[in-house]
Image (cartoon, rainbow, N blue to C red):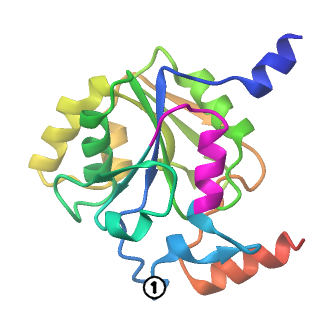
């Protein structure tokens, strides 16, 4: 019975935050709205988050593009400061002690992977997945306790997630397997991913 509870668990102490603030330069258009297996990528990520968290925010520079989605829209306080700026806006807005952050370009993200990261990270400042291909800072759990540290980082001109996370003392690294962390940066990435996961 414990296993069944784990795979269906909801985390009310965490807000799901979907980041959709990028300019999609390499993709050539708004990649959040590009389709993967006949569904917009942002809708797939949102569905995975909704399976785990009762509260969802979409952090974006262009909220008017996402009004059709069943989630609260949050305009970035400081537009175009990169993902770290969007995370700061979200952490300042949420009422829960944690946010699970997911990029809009990860169409294979699934609830099981999300639950694994959250379970490993609760009680810590952050939890970031890793796999042989790298570290996934935009599929991670962040505590509101990081707000001062994020603000200081942005004020110093440090916008890179990797550099910011290197300064988090209480960070858990969480191993993940499979392609749940696969992200799409170009149309070629999208075609390749669809080819490997044809219906």
Q: Residue at x 59, y 43 (%)?
A: 49
Q: From what the image shows, is residue 147 above or below residue 187?
A: above
In percent of width and height, residue 53 lies at 57, 32
In percent of width and height, residue 116 lies at 67, 30
In percent of width and height, residue 66 lies at 43, 64
Q: Residue at x 86, y 20 (%)?
A: 4
* Nearer-the-camera pick, 68 or 167: 68
Q: Residue at x 33, y 32 (%)?
A: 94
Provide the residue designation for mark 1. 29
- Residue 50 appearing in the image: yes
Q: How many marks?
A: 1
Quadrant where the C terminus sits is bottom right
- Residue 106 appearing in the image: no
Numbered disc 1: secondary structure:
loop
Specify whether 79 is left or right of 171: left
- In magenta stretch: residue 10: no
- In magenta stretch: residue 52: yes
In percent of width and height, residue 125 lies at 39, 23
């Amino acid at each position: 019975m414990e296993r069944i509870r784990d795979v269906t668990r909801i985390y009310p102490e965490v807000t799901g935050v979907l980041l959709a603030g990028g300019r999609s330069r390499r993709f050539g258009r708004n990649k959040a709205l590009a389709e993967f297996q006949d569904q917009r990528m942002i809708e797939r990520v949102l569905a995975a988050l909704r399976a785990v968290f009762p509260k969802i925010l979409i952090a974006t520079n262009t909220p008017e593009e996402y009004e059709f989605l069943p989630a609260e829209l949050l305009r970035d306080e400081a537009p175009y400061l990169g993902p770290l700026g969007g995370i700061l806006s979200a952490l300042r807005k949420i009422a829960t002690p944690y946010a699970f952050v997911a990029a809009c370009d990860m169409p294979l993200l699934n609830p099981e992977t999300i639950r694994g990261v959250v379970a490993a990270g609760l009680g810590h400042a952050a939890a970031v997945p890793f796999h042989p291909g790298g570290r996934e800072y935009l599929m991670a759990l962040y505590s509101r306790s990081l707000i001062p540290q994020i603000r200081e980082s942005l004020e110093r001109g440090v916008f890179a997630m990797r550099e910011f996370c290197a300064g988090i003392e209480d960070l858990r690294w969480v191993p993940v397997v499979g392609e749940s962390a696969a992200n799409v940066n170009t149309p070629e990435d999208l075609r390749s991913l669809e080819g490997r996961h044809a219906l």
